[in-house]
Image (cartoon, rainbow, N blue to C red):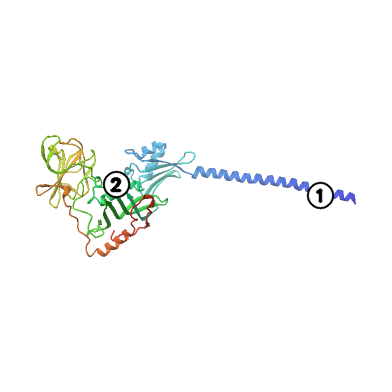
């Protein structure tokens, strides 16, 4: 009996040992098989990264350099650059390349050329990429959503600086200056603690950033306690125009200044002023705006150029005749941008500030005349355009109330201002 017990014990021991060795071989085989599978996946992932992952290098398009030259400057092989240019031409005229726009060249992780991406504007991007043995190009639309948002701020320096401090782009300051340009001079009128509020359409990209501004639906500028307010509607001809909440047109026959951001006045209209060059007292029948050479000069109203050229002590001079009997004069220009007989529109750039003729420094001598009598432009009442008609009043009132409801609360501190954001609603007839 004991003998059989010993034999059985040995059999159990041998079987257990065999099972252990077998399990060890199986575990090792499984581990090797798993390692091989993981190595295969790793190699596949490495190939995918090499073939599919594109790393982009971004630059701003430099001025006066053709597309081909830009690609060469970014390290693209001349033959590949030439093929990329040829592929792009059927879908986009590369002569319209804009300096400052974003251009990106994509390469694989191993440095192989994969794509060119050029931002045409806020809505479109040009893609150029190898496809098979050739190149393919396409213009894609950038997804965006338009929202109306409230923005507010306080003036500490200029309107330009304060709009940027409020987290917005300089374009918004330019737009506000245009809206209130008939009532305010944004060089001389703004004071510290003035405030502004605006409801503006913003084109939002998928990442939440603002790609562009749309219409300004309503705006307010509070200048030393006096609030100027504007609401978007349309004029009798159907064009976009701004009106006060009471329906009066913001537009006047003349702009408030011959400079978009009018410079400080260095010499006022006077019947008895000492001339700094001629050293004698004589009438000064205009207003001198001190501004750097090259500052753009705009015509204050629609009209026709009746003289453009050099004229004695006035230097380079432009005379504009307006349909309401007025003539305006723009003197001492460094450059004239219009010609005799040309029709000009209110706000059109017609020249650049200079110091030609009898001038001690760069400035614009601006004058206005009616019926052969020069007038003091600083004290001249500026007639407005037509108000809202009775027929249009219900539609205007609805557009006004909607826009003003979106206005942010009066400005206190920037940290306390919350943007009021809603889907943009179309204004009537816009």
Q: Nearer the viewer, residue 22 or 138?
A: 22
In the picture, the disc for residue 12 is 1
Label 1 Cα crowd, 10 Å radius (few <14 / some 14-19 / many 20+): few
As drawn, the residue found furthest toward the left would be 372
Q: Nearer the viewer, residue 108 or 384?
A: 384
82 vs 193, left or right, is: right
248 vs 277, left or right, is: right
Secondary structure at badge 1 equals helix
Counting from the top left corner in percent of width and height, residue 161 is at 32, 45
Counting from the top left corner in percent of width and height, residue 76 is at 41, 37
Picture quarter containing residue 98?
top left
Secondary structure at badge 2 equals loop
Assign the C terminus to one quadrant of the image: bottom left
271 vs 210, left or right, is: left
Counting from the top left corner in percent of width and height, residue 74 is at 40, 37
54 vs 99, left or right, is: right
The answer to whether 423 is drawn above or below residue 76 in the figure is below
In the picture, the disc for residue 192 is 2
Q: Name the residue: 81% across, 49% down.
A: 12
Q: Earlier in the sequence, mark 1 or mark 2?
A: 1
In the picture, the disc for residue 243 is none
The answer to whether 171 is drawn above or below residue 148 in the figure is above
The answer to whether 118 is drawn above or below residue 235 in the figure is above
């Amino acid at each position: 009996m004991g003998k059989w017990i010993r034999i059985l014990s040995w059999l159990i021991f041998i079987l257990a040992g065999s099972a252990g060795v077998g399990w060890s071989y199986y575990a090792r085989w499984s581990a090797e098989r798993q390692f091989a599978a993981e190595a295969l996946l790793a190699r596949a992932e490495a190939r995918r990264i090499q073939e599919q992952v594109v790393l982009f290098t971004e630059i701003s398009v430099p001025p006066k350099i053709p597309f081909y030259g830009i690609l060469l400057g970014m390290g693209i092989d001349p033959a590949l650059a030439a093929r990329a240019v040829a592929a792009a031409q059927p879908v986009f005229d590369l002569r319209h390349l804009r300096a400052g726009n974003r251009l990106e060249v994509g390469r694989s992780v191993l440095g192989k050329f994969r794509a060119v991406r050029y931002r045409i504007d806020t809505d479109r991007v040009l893609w150029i990429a190898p496809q098979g043995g050739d190149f393919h190009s396409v213009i894609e639309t950038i997804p965006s959503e338009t929202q109306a948002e409230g923005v507010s701020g306080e003036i500490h320096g200029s309107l330009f600086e304060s709009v940027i401090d409020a987290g917005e782009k300089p374009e918004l300051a330019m737009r506000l200056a245009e809206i209130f340009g008939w009532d305010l001079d944004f060089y001389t009128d703004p004071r510290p603690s003035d405030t502004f509020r605006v409801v503006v359409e913003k084109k939002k990209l998928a990442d939440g950033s603002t790609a562009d501004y749309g219409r300004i639906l309503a705006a307010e500028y509070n200048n030393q306690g006096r609030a100027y307010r504007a609401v978007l509607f349309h004029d009798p001809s159907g064009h976009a125009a701004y009106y006060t909440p009471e329906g009066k047109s913001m537009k006047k026959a003349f702009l408030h200044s011959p400079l978009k951001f009018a410079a400080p006045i260095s010499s006022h209209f006077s019947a008895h002023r000492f001339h700094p060059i001629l050293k004698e007292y004589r009438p000064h029948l205009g207003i001198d705006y001190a501004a750097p050479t090259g500052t753009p000069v705009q015509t204050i109203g629609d009209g026709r150029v009746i003289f453009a050229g050099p004229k004695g002590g006035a230097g380079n001079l432009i005379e504009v005749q307006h349909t309401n009997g007025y003539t305006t004069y723009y003197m001492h220009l460094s450059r004239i941008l219009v010609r005799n007989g040309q029709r000009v529109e209110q706000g059109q750039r017609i020249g650049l500030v200079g110091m030609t003729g009898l001038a001690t420094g760069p400035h614009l001598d601006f004058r206005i005349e009616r019926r052969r009598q020069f007038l003091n432009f600083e004290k001249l009442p500026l007639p407005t355009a037509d108000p809202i008609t009775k027929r249009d009043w219900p539609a205007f009132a609805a557009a006004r109330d909607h826009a003003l409801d979106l206005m942010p609360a009066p400005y206190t501190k920037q940290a306390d201002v919350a943007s009021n954001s809603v889907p943009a609603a179309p204004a009537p007839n816009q």
